[in-house]
């Protein structure tokens, strides 16, 4: 549910005010239905649930443009915006979020100021380094994991995972440091229209 919550809040924040079908269409255009649990039912459930929690304002039904039943429109409240940013920060800094949560956060990373996104990603790198040290710190010097049988394979899996995620995160940090993406609070680039 965390992934759907993050995606729905992010899509709604970008639209300003929208009904469920628009949010679902946005998520499908991002391919989220392929790599997350953002199905039609989960999107509508998340909207109603978050409205009940005060994270969204639900506006009275508006007539459907397609001639179907009336649709409720939703808009982020201040607590909803705070919840969204907190989810985004946590997902970027976490050393091992589920892949769908991390994918959602990276897809929405432009909603953070550049330095804040970098701070979250550097925290992730630090957490990954600590995790790796917690694994290797218990191994005797010159350990050959190939001689440890299945336990060696498990340790190798964790070390490979930590190394891969650290390399990927460092690459993203480098891209952000190099000016990739139009981040929140960035000055418009020459020739770029201000938002």
Image (cartoon, rainbow, N blue to C red):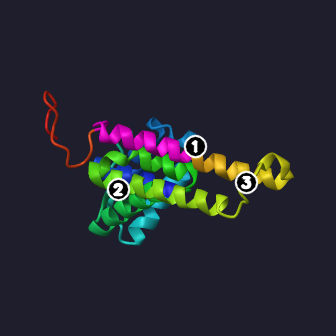
Tell me the SS state at disc 3.
Answer: helix
Residue shown at the point (51%, 42%) measured from the top left: 167
Relative to 142, say whether 80 is above or below. below
Residue 51 is a magenta residue = no
Are the residues flagged by discs 2 and 1 in contact, CB closer than 8 Å? no
Q: Is residue 177 magenta?
A: yes
Which percent across, then down, holds residue 108? 38, 47
Near-viewer residue (11 or 160) = 160
Which is more N-terminal, label 2 or label 3?
2
| Sequence order check, earlier mark of 1 and 3 | 3
**Furthest residue in direction front, as rendered:** 141
Q: Give the magenta part as a residue range.
A: 165-181
**Residue 70: % across, % down:** 38, 52
Which residue corresponds to mark 1? 164
Q: Is residue 188 left or right of residue 58?
A: left
Separation (CA) of disc 1 from disc 3: 14 Å
Q: Position of residue 56 (x, y in %)?
A: 34, 64
User: Which residue is the site of mark 2?
Assistant: 119
View extreme (bottom): residue: 53
Instruction: State which quarter of the image contains the N terminus.
Output: bottom right
The C terminus appears in which quarter of the rendering?
Answer: top left
Which residue carries the number 3 mark? 155
| Circle 1 Cα neighbour tier, 10 Å, few/some/many (<14 / 14–19 / ≥20) | few
């Amino acid at each position: 549910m965390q992934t759907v919550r993050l995606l729905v809040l992010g899509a709604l924040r970008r639209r300003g005010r929208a009904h469920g079908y628009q949010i679902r269409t946005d998520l499908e255009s991002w391919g989220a239905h392929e790599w997350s649990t953002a199905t039609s039912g989960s999107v509508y459930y998340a909207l109603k649930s978050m409205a009940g929690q005060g994270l969204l304002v639900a506006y009275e039904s508006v007539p459907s443009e397609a001639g179907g039943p009336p649709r409720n429109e939703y808009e982020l409240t201040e607590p909803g915006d705070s919840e969204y940013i907190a989810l985004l920060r946590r997902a970027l800094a976490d050393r091992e979020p589920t892949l769908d949560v991390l994918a959602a956060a990276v897809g929405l990373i432009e909603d953070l100021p550049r330095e804040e996104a970098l701070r979250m990603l550097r925290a992730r790198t630090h957490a990954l380094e600590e995790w790796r040290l917690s694994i290797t710190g218990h191994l005797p010097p010159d350990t050959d994991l190939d001689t440890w049988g299945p336990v060696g394979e498990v340790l190798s899996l964790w070390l490979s995972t930590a190394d891969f995620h650290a390399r990927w995160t460092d690459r993203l940090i480098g891209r952000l440091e190099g000016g990739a993406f139009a981040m929140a609070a960035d000055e418009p680039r020459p020739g770029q229209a201000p938002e």
